[in-house]
Image (cartoon, rainbow, N blue to C red):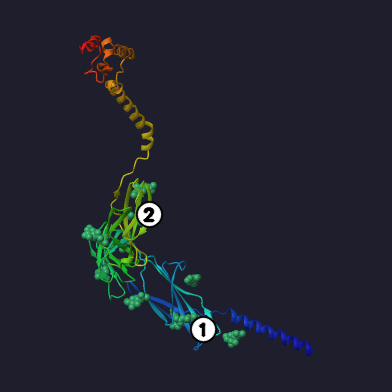
Amino acid sequence: MCRFWDISLIICFSVSVMFVGGDNISELPPPPQNLTFIWETPFRLSLTWEKPEDLDRSCIVNYTVNVHHSQECSGKYDSRRVQALGCKLNISNEKGLCISVTTNLENCGKSGSSQATNISIAPPSVRLVENRSYEYSHSKMNCTWIPVVDVQDLSLYYWLPRYESVKKCIPDETLKPRGCIIHDEFLKDTLDIFYLFNGTYNGTSVFNTFTDERPVKYVKLNKPQLTIHKDRQKLIFQANGSDLDEFAKECYSYIYTISKCNKNSTVKDKEHYEVQYDPACKYRARVQVDFSQKCGAGKSDLSDEVEYGEDSDPKLPALLAVIIIPLIVSLCLLVSLVLLRRHKDIIFPQIPEPSLLFKDMLINNIRTPEELQSPATGRLYIPLEEVVESKISLEPDTPFVPMMKNEPK
Ligand SMILES: *[C@@H]1O[C@H](CO)[C@@H](O)[C@H](O)[C@H]1NC(C)=O
Ligand SMILES: *[C@@H]1O[C@H](CO)[C@@H](O)[C@H](O)[C@H]1NC(C)=O
Ligand SMILES: *[C@@H]1O[C@H](CO)[C@@H](O)[C@H](O)[C@H]1NC(C)=O
Ligand SMILES: *[C@@H]1O[C@H](CO)[C@@H](O)[C@H](O)[C@H]1NC(C)=O
Ligand SMILES: *[C@@H]1O[C@H](CO)[C@@H](O)[C@H](O)[C@H]1NC(C)=O
Ligand SMILES: *[C@@H]1O[C@H](CO)[C@@H](O)[C@H](O)[C@H]1NC(C)=O
Ligand SMILES: *[C@@H]1O[C@H](CO)[C@@H](O)[C@H](O)[C@H]1NC(C)=O
Ligand SMILES: *[C@@H]1O[C@H](CO)[C@@H](O)[C@H](O)[C@H]1NC(C)=O
Ligand SMILES: *[C@@H]1O[C@H](CO)[C@@H](O)[C@H](O)[C@H]1NC(C)=O
Ligand SMILES: *[C@@H]1O[C@H](CO)[C@@H](O)[C@H](O)[C@H]1NC(C)=O
Ligand SMILES: *[C@@H]1O[C@H](CO)[C@@H](O)[C@H](O)[C@H]1NC(C)=O
């Protein structure tokens, strides 16, 4: 009997411990209640909620607010934690919104986060514009767009969180397809900018709100100029932009596209860039100014193309070997043959006939008896005069020999 009671008591106790313990573990903090919203301005959404019921007064509680930029409560979201029973968001509603709020508890036994309480906000009933784009320079921003529906009095307003109310973007007929210009000294420094398009559509006043990146992400720079010059063995590329005074010098970099002997390459450098010069190559180059990531984003147009040097024809040596050299050689040969023929007498002088020479020597050396007795009157051998030039040639003839013989008499 006693044993039975003991056993039932033990079973009972352990079951109750298990039940109570299990209950505490599975219980999450309660979610916030009665979540509501109101648009205070087209860009300011005010949220309020109430503290969950049956929560101990001593509990430390705060709330997580997640904002999804679509009606579905899924995908990317912005998150923030607040201790109050509400918050105000600077926000636009382009594609609808989903807002979810959870309770976070501390030192209450129940710890962790509750389930979410969600609200969903519908997008505007009509979309007025698409393909918005911006170009910023020197406190001015050109905004352009394509209208989607026919709205006669469509206007664009903008708002910076530092302002009480919206300001008008001044319409400009020259901007295509439609556009206006914001002139505001705070554009450069603002982190948030909101836009509002409104007009009358189908008899009722409608508006759309948007937000895009801060203005310095849409910097537009003027087309730069590029010059190329040579300094000793270096080729120097010099970029010159006309509107690079708005931001710090470090914000700008230069992208050079250089074609050397028809091979393209791209380098990012300062406004001054140099390479080793190759005289055999033609250089073509362009430059583009880049507004760097840490200051914002943007680019200039490409500069005009600038050229330097000439390509030496790579076929020339082959052409030289195959055609030109043999041509020159044969021409030289031809000319020398003609010259040779014309001046053959100078180049190859006429050699006197040896038989004639010997005969002459013999005749000259025959001595008379008187001549033998007086050797003083002994005549020397007088050779025939050599013929050098045909024009003044004195061809030896036979009458010349007796004349010489008779001379001493
Ligand atoms: C379970 O929760 C209750 C209050 O709801 C508390 O008194 C009890 O101590 C908790 N038990 C455990 C095991 O945490
Ligand atoms: C929440 O709203 C409901 C009506 O929707 C109301 O009955 C209830 O009292 C509200 N809760 C609180 C805590 O005010
Ligand atoms: C509320 O939104 C969250 C995402 O933030 C989602 O996980 C949850 O299912 C939603 N709850 C309801 C009741 O729709
Ligand atoms: C909110 O509560 C969590 C714990 O629940 C805590 O870690 C966090 O610091 C709290 N945040 C604020 C802003 O109180
Ligand atoms: C708007 O831009 C998208 C790409 O961003 C393009 O496909 C579309 O054709 C553009 N719409 C018009 C009307 O030009
Ligand atoms: C903005 O538009 C005006 C008028 O068409 C033009 O003169 C100016 O260069 C543009 N500014 C920029 C930064 O594109
Ligand atoms: C929202 O705008 C107000 C000015 O209306 C500003 O005081 C507040 O800091 C802004 N909030 C955020 C999160 O930027
Ligand atoms: C557009 O909004 C501005 C500023 O809020 C307002 O002055 C103007 O009357 C509105 N125009 C239309 C057609 O709703
Ligand atoms: C214009 O408004 C009328 C009612 O005011 C509605 O019946 C009609 O469908 C609307 N047209 C468009 C194109 O939204
Ligand atoms: C850049 O060009 C402008 C004229 O286009 C000229 O006035 C200026 O001196 C040039 N600057 C440099 C560094 O060459
Ligand atoms: C090199 O760049 C020029 C423009 O500067 C372009 O026309 C050409 O197609 C490019 N060649 C190659 C091989 O990429």
Pointer 2 local density, CA inside 10 Å: few below 14, some 14–19, many at least 20: few
- Mark 1, ligand 4, within 8 Å: the answer is yes
Q: Which percent across, then down, holds residue 182?
A: 25, 66
**Local SS, label 2:** strand
Tell me if residue 204 can be seen: no
The quarter of the image holding the C terminus is: top left
| Between discs 1 and 2, the one toward the N terminus | 1
Q: Which percent across, then down, holds residue 289?
A: 31, 59
- In the image: residue 173, left or right of residue 120: left
- In the image: residue 275, left or right of residue 142: right
Identity of the residue drawn at 23% across and 63% down:
171
Identity of the residue drawn at 75% across and 86% down:
7
Mark carried by residue 148: none
Q: Which percent across, then down, holds residue 12?
A: 70, 85
Ligand 5 quadrant assignment: bottom left
Q: Nearer the viewer, residue 324 or 369?
A: 369
Q: Check disc 2 and report the residue beneath it.
A: 266
**Local SS, label 1:** strand
The quarter of the image holding the N terminus is: bottom right
Work out whether 346 lies above or below 46.
Answer: above
Q: Check disc 1 and report the residue beneath it.
A: 106
Q: Nearer the viewer, residue 324 or 175?
A: 324
Q: Which of marks 1 and 2 is in front?
A: 2
Q: Which percent across, then down, holds residue 99?
A: 43, 72
Work out whether 109 lies above or below 383.
Answer: below
Q: Distance between the residues labelled 1 and 2?
A: 58 Å
The quadrant in which residue 269 appears is bottom left
Q: Which amino acid does label 1 sit on?
A: Glu
